[in-house]
Image (cartoon, grey):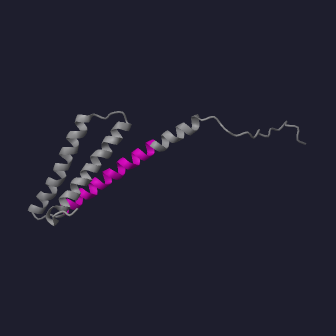
């Protein structure tokens, strides 16, 4: 799929904003505070604002606004991924801790009869 070079940077920024919103929604779902209206409005507004700020930066001659948006969205994506990962690690630990021990070895005690 080819994209016009004039809109490629805006499209990539829109994709980053969308990924950030989706991961934020997953995080909110894990934390038990997901609201679909907040998710959909945030997805739309964040995408439009990210692209709009980058376009505005281009219009006034400040191309670094695009780079700043990429850095901010990238850091938010990594933060959400790390929190989601931490949730699954802690959930896995809790499951393993609740499983019965499968060890058949009897612990050696001081009075086990071994001289």
Of 76 and 19, nearer the camera is 19
**Percent from the top left, x then y, of residue 46?**
20, 47
At x 40%, y 45%, the residue is 83
Q: Nearer the viewer, residue 14 or 77?
A: 14
Locate the C terminus and report the quarter of the image it occupies.
Answer: top right
Hey, which residue is sitting farthest front in the picture?
1
Magenta residues? 64-87
* Dominant secondary structure, magenta: helix
For residue 68, side relative to residue 61 (left or right):
right
In the figure, 40 relative to 70: above or below?
above
In this view, which residue lies farthest toward the right?
A: 115
User: Would residue 55 appear left or right of 25 to someone viewing this image?
Assistant: left
Identify the image quadrant of residue 22. top left
91 sits left or right of 110 in the view? left
The residue shown at (36%, 33%) is 32
Query: Where's residue 12, x and y in %?
Result: 23, 58
Which residue lies at the image location 38% right of the left edge and 38% below the top edge? 30
Residue sitting nearer the eye, 2 or 111: 2
How many circles with numbers are drawn on the protein?
0
Residue 74 vs residue 40, the one in the foreground? 40
Question: Does the segment drawn in magenta span residue 70?
Answer: yes
* Residue projecting furthest to the left: 59
107 within the magenta span: no
* Picture quarter with the N terminus: bottom left
Is 15 drawn above or below residue 39 in the view shown? below
């Amino acid at each position: 799929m080819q994209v016009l070079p004039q809109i490629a940077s805006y499209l990539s920024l829109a994709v980053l904003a969308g990924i950030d919103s989706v991961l934020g929604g997953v995080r909110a779902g894990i934390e038990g505070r997901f609201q679909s209206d907040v998710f959909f409005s945030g997805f739309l507004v964040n995408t439009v604002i990210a692209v709009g700020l980058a376009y505005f930066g281009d219009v006034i001659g400040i191309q670094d606004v695009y780079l700043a948006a990429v850095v901010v969205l990238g850091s938010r994506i990594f933060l959400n991924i790390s929190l989601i990962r931490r949730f699954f690690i802690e959930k896995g630990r809790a499951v393993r801790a609740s499983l019965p021990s499968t060890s058949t070895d009897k612990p050696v005690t001081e009075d086990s009869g071994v001289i």
